[in-house]
Image (spheres, grey):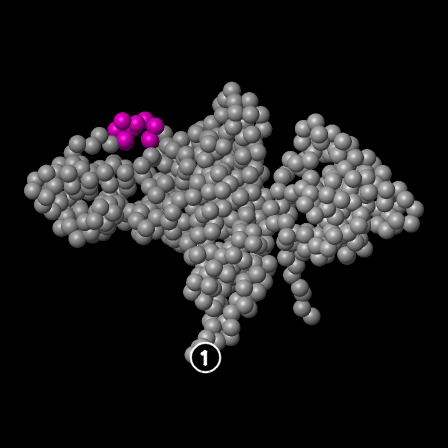
Amino acid sequence: MTTTTLSKGQQQAADLSALLRARNPFIWIVTKEEARVEGFIAEAAAAAGYPAHFWDVAQGVTNIAGKKESVGSEDLEATLNAIGDRATKEGSERGVWILRDLPVWLAGPMGAKPLRQLRNLARLFPPRERAQPIIVLTPNSDVPPDLTGQATVIEWPLPDRTEIAAILDTAISTLPETDKEGNPLRSVAAPNGVREAAIEAAIGLSGEEAQGCFARSLVQTRKIDPVLVASEKKRVIAREKVLEWYDPLPNGLDAVGGLENIKAWLMLRKSAYSKEAREYGLPAPQGVLTVGVSGCGKTLLAQATSTAYRIPLLKLDLGALKGKFVGESEGNLRKALRVIEAVGRCVVWLDEIEKSLQGATSGSADGGVSADALGAILTWMQERRGQAFIFATANDITSLPPELLRKGRFDEIWFVDVPNAEERKAVLKAALVKYGRPKAKIDFAAVAEKCPEYTGAEIAAIVPDALFTAFNDGAREITTADLIEAAGTVVPLTTTASEKIQALRTWAKGRARPATKAIQTKVQAPVRSLGI
């Protein structure tokens, strides 16, 4: 016996059918995918025993096939009157009415009459045999206050993995079996690994966007290109204007010197995103909070994680979401969280999170906006169902609310300290690669010795300083002496903010995992007494 798994759209259609059978008079469906969702609505209406009628300002009333019907007209008020007549007239056939262009007709003084008509229709509640439920289909989630008491609001989900797979298979089926030379086309357009990657890349796109990406890839290359599909997400993020998209960091985790403990942990969790891991029942990682000294690689590590996981990096700037109007900040945050859920697999970067949430614990005079943002973030972190990996950074742990630190919000809390001697060498090597000097003959141990208690950023900064010296000395190659001279001019952060850094280290003991691998030192064996 096989069990058929319903897609999210099919599940929502089943819920809608139940609402219709329960005689809900007014349903407000929020979606940008009019054509796709109308198909689900028609299925739900048919399952509930309702003929479906569609209205828009251009065509008037039509059936699901687009054929014009005699009832109603392009005029909204006339159509609402016709619906009311059918609800009150004995012997009328019941039906569900899908209104496409409604919100624009409900705004301003001219919207007073249709608003009242809709409220009156919702109050009629005719017998089951002539029920006339109304469904509003719109991308606008703002239900007029006059209708909030009558409206059941549904936010229709984007296509999930099951629907995307069906869209992909349909796109591939348009290819001929073979090319003119008899070479296979359709069977090699998306091998198993590529097919899974393409489906994953398309999660978060609308059905039309995914279909367009697949079709464009097939036209250009006769194959499915997951990279081309994923690039469409960048346009989606730019369009919504509530998140920032960051391009992958070249070389990934190899570009981050040191921090071996957290890098190993991140790579171990990477396997949780595979198809085999899902079938095994492995949970998707939730994310990490990195706390530590400023300039020691927390931001760089967030960007490198995105590269290592081969997923987008989205920066969620809570401060930038704050608006000047009441409720605007909360609305922007909810929108950002919806976009994250829609995008699917991604790294969500919360940089210096303590600054964004400072008002939630310090009594900020922002009207409770910071506290509301904290509540929304905590709820989302606890209840989210998507595969977003949260990478939060903080320099001052004492400013963070305790409820954010409890187990379950993050998989781990990591402490990032200044690099040790071996890590200073690794940071210096990575900086030389960045500035195009990977083969420079440098005594890394000697330079590292001259940078005690330097942050990673301070060590990396001595490379361009040394390059300036070498360039102005006949454009020669950089030397160890140049780097040591540049290092001598630095006053490290551990000196200028020694008290704060020491307090941070004291807090981290026993509360956070060290991101840096401890250096193993050789212990000399005790000398046996010879009894002399």
At which x and y percent is residue 425?
22, 46
At which x and y percent is residue 134?
76, 44
Q: Which residue lies furthest to the bottom in this view?
A: 182
- Please say if 370 is above or below 426: above
Q: Which residue lies furthest to the top in this view?
A: 365
User: Does residue 44 appear in this view?
Assistant: no
User: Does residue 357 appear in this view?
Assistant: yes
Q: Residues within 10 Å of mark 1 (few under 14, many from 20)?
A: few
Q: What element carries label 1?
A: loop
Dominant SS of magenta comes to: helix
Q: Quickly name the residue at label 1.
A: 182
At which x and y percent is residue 90?
92, 46
Residue at the spot 12% in from the left edge and 38% down from the top edge:
469
Q: Is residue 267 left or right of residue 491?
A: right
Q: Is residue 189 left or right of residue 462?
A: right
Q: Residue furthest left?
A: 474
- Please say if 80 is above or below 217: above
Q: Is residue 27 left or right of residue 417?
A: right
Residue at the spot 24% in from the left edge and 32% down from the top edge:
492
- Please say if 228 is above or below 424: below
Quick one: 187 or 487, which is closer to the camera? 187
Q: Residue furthest right?
A: 90
Quick one: 350 or 454, which is closer to the camera? 350
At which x and y percent is residue 427?
26, 45
Quadrant in which the N terminus appears: bottom right
What span is colored magenta in the figure? Answer: 493-502
Number of residue marks: 1
Quick one: 339 or 393, which is closer to the camera? 339
Which amino acid, by three-letter code, is at mark 1?
A: Gly
Q: Does the magenta stretch include residue 501?
A: yes
Q: Is residue 281 magenta?
A: no
Residue at the spot 59% in from the left edge and 50% down from the top edge:
158
